Image (tube, rainbow, N blue to C red):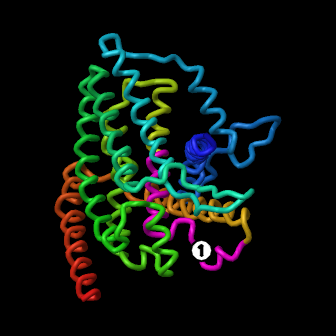
Amino acid sequence: MTDTLWTLTLTLGAIGFGLNIAGLLGWVERKQSAVLQDRIGANRASIFGFTLLGLFHPLADALKTMTKEDFAPPFALKPWHGLAPALSLGFSMLALAALPYGEVIEFAGRSWRLQPLPLSGGVVFVLGTLAIGVHGVVMAGYASNSNYALLGGLRGAAQMVSYEVSMLTSLAALLFIYGTLDLGQAVRWQAAHGLWGIVLQPLGFILFMTAGAAETKRTPFDLPEGEAEIVGYFIEYSGMKFVMFMMTDFMETIVLAGLCTTLYLGGWHLPGLLSLPQPFLGLAQIAVFSTKTCAVIFLLMQIRWTLPRFRFDQLLHLGWKNLLPLSLANVFVTLWVVYFLQS
């Protein structure tokens, strides 16, 4: 019973962590883009005259969207129209529960794990739950009964399926070195050998980050939205349902950053960290994992406000004719290197 309650607590904590970071990212997007474009950014929303660098803007956005009319097109497929955003956001939040936020610690005479769902196939679980998001994208486009929304949904499906192939292939070489699909074991391997995945697979890291950015549908890969062309799979959504789709993009970014931290940046591992006494060790590991994750998110935001959007033919060309061949070559080279080192 205690283990079940602890698992539930950790899972809710992981989801809460993701929701809080996702809410903050609305402010980060405004401020980081403002810094890059040499302007002030969000600074209007205030409470008693205090703006706090625009931190009240996410709160104002939440209040606005909760009071906006929940509109659905008259000829839309109402049940599926409402299910689509919940499907996308729900599964992206579930993926957070499989990430290893820390090692098992000893406290009050028993062991406490800091990974909500310690699955032997954690990599498959995370990537599988993220892949379900494509169903929400297509469902939203089809259920809206709009040609513009349907075109956005088809764009999203083609893009996400294409880059999932490259993302999985880029991970294959690194997982072959670790010899496991368990995310916790992958971090322990890096801690035991003193080598992070980014050192072992620098090309794999670049390929994974590129494919992952496309998977999250963020600029320069935001073709499923296409605001300039008034084409987007959520064009017929308003209020909280629209925000749920926007939160899904943020949540997928957080999951991608967490997965990158786990597999390429040593997860909760930091040299000398294990010398800390328990239970402070657990808190330090959670802090290290969160800091690394936020650093990756910052990098993705820099890319988001630096590069222009691809054309759709350029998007598919990059995925199938550049990322996938490089990922396959990286796998084969890694296999041969590991074979010769072990022989």
**Is residue 232 at all visible to an observer of this figure?**
no
Q: In the rendered view, would you say 195 is above or below 38?
A: below
Percent across and percent down for residue 102 are 58, 61
Q: Is residue 185 left or right of residue 43?
A: left
* Screen quadrant of the C terminus: bottom left
Q: Is residue 61 visible?
A: yes
Q: Residue furthest top?
A: 74
Q: Secondary structure at mark 1?
A: loop
Q: 129 or 317: which is nearer to us?
A: 129
* Highlighted range, magenta: 251-276
Question: Which quadrant would the N terminus be assigned to in this image?
Answer: top right
- Asked if residue 235 lies left or right of residue 284, the reply is left
Residue that mark 1 sits on: 270
Could you say where residue 342 lies in the image, as x and y percent from the top left? 28, 86
Q: Is residue 269 magenta?
A: yes
Query: In this image, 70 relative to 152: left or right?
Result: right
Q: Is 255 part of what is drawn in magenta?
A: yes
How many marks on residues?
1
Q: Main secondary structure of the magenta part?
A: helix
Residue 156 lies, with reference to residue 121, above or below; the image says: above
Identified by mark 1, the residue type is: Leu
How far from the left and from the top, in percent, is residue 252? 44, 47
Residue 176: quadrant of the picture: bottom left
Residue drawn at x 35%, y 15% as measured from the top left: 78
Compared with 136, 308 (above or below) is below
Determine which quarter of the picture holds residue 317.
Answer: bottom left
Locate residue 111, reporting x and y percent.
64, 58
Residue placed farthest to the right in the image? 48
* Residue that appears at 36% across and 47% down: 217
